[in-house]
Structures are given as C-alpha cells and as structure tokens.
Amino acid sequence: MNHKTISNLIQRCLWFIIGVAVNSFGVAFVTKSALGTSQISSIPYVLSLKFPSVSFGLSTFFLNMLFILIQILLLRRKFHPVQFLQIAANILFSWLIDLSMGLLGFFNPQALWLRILSLLVGCAILAVGIAVEVAPNVIVVPGEGIVRAFSDTFHIRFGTVKVYFDVTLIVISTILSLLFFGKLNGVGFGTVVSAVTVGRLVNLVNRRLPLIGRIRRKAQAACAA
C-alpha cells in the first residue's frame, strides 16, 4: 500500500467520522424538538427516558451492538472482518450523541413553531451527515449494516427492507412507550416526519452538494486502483 493509497484511506475515514459527528447533532436537534426522536434512535431514547441512569448514548450503543450481533448470525462467513469496525463507529456515535445532547442542554424550545423548526433542522442535519458518512465507502454503521444483512440473506431489495426496518423500530418504540408511561413519550409526530423526510433529503444533498460527489469519486478511484 503506497503513500497515496494510505493518504486516500485516511481522508475517507476522516470524512466518515465527520459524517457520524454531524449525524449525532442531527439526532440531538430532532430529539430536542420534544416531538419524538428519529426512527433509528427511537428505541434507545425511550429506554433512556425509562431508565435515567442509562444515557441516550449508552442505550444507543447497546442496541447497535445487538444489530452487529444479528448481522454476524445472519451473514456468518460472509460477515467480513473489516465490518467489526462497526463497533468502533458505534462507540464514537454513541459518545457523540451524549456530547451533542449535552452541548444542546440549554436548548429546550417551548413554542410549537420553534419545536417544529428544531425538528426540521435536525432532519436536514441528519441528511447531510448520512450523505457525508456513506460517500467515502469505508464501512457501514450498524443501523445500515443490519438492513444490508437482511437484504442479502433473504434476497429482498435494500430499500424495501429499510422501510420495514424503520416501521418496526417505530412500532417497538411506541409499544415500549405505552408500556412504560401509558402514553407516547420520546416517540411521536417527529419520528414519523424524520422517517419520511430524511431519505428524500439525503437524495437532495447527494444531487446538490458538490462535496459529496468529490468524496464519492475519491472512494471510487481508490476501490478501482
């Protein structure tokens, strides 16, 4: 592996880390809207509300470790060793969620218009983060990895599995919320908005943000080399 290849890999890893960091702030803004967090974070957030001693980030870590375990069970020998780096990405993302929530501790919008604004800003930030995270083609995060594992194992289109996966997360978090609190708490209108808008916003970012194209081209050139 020559110097140029190593430099390219380091740059791609840095972009991946930046994408994960941006993602964490997106999740924090959506959560701070108090209209329900994003679908991928809905179960950990409800659990963190029920068990305050377990932070939002820590509950996210445990759920993502479960996602990684399911990938290993589904793919078996097809689970490439490099994908164990998902554990490092999980640690980073979980820590950054707690950091983001802490940095936004002062931000507790009360007016409905401000809460909706926080939700929409969070969805937009999430979309940028996901686009930046995926473009370097380094590794997948556990939430995407488990969808790919189901898709590859059962030969179902990725997009179809993603829809069912997101709906399943929302249903489980809703059931948990009703069991724990007797009402919706931590999941709600904002969760649905996030589920139906973030993917479309990612497509928009991919088309309109030149940076994403540059990152993707570098990744493609490295893979072709």
Image (cartoon, rainbow, N blue to C red):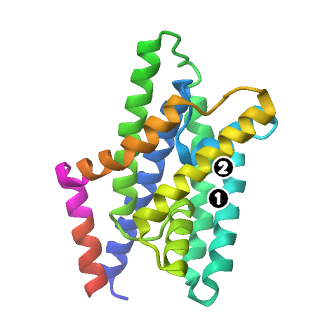
Query: Residue 223: where, in percent of width, then height?
Result: 31, 82
Along the line of sight, which residue is nearer the eye, 205 or 12? 205
Tag 1 residue: 64
Query: Residue 77: where, in percent of width, then height?
Result: 61, 90
User: Compared to 222, does 180 lie above or below?
Assistant: above
What residue range appears in magenta? 206-215
Q: Secondary structure at mark 2?
A: helix
Instruction: Tell me what residue is drawn at x 31 percent, y 47 percent.
Output: 200
User: Compared to 159, does 49 lie above or below?
Assistant: above
Measure the C-alpha gap from mark 2 to mark 1.
6 Å
Hey, what amino acid is under mark 2? Answer: Thr
Q: Secondary structure at mark 1?
A: helix
Is residue 23 magenta-colored? no
User: Compared to 214, does 207 lie above or below?
Assistant: above
Q: Judge left or right: residue 100 versus residue 130.
A: right
Along the line of sight, which residue is nearer the eye, 197 or 48? 197
Hey, what amino acid is under mark 1? Answer: Asn
User: Compared to 160, does 177 lie above or below?
Assistant: above
Contact between marks 2 and 1 (CB within 8 A): the answer is yes
Tag 2 residue: 60
Q: Judge left or right: residue 121 versus residue 162.
A: left
* Mark drawn on residue 130: none
Instruction: Tell me what residue is drawn at x 40 percent, y 37 percent.
Output: 123
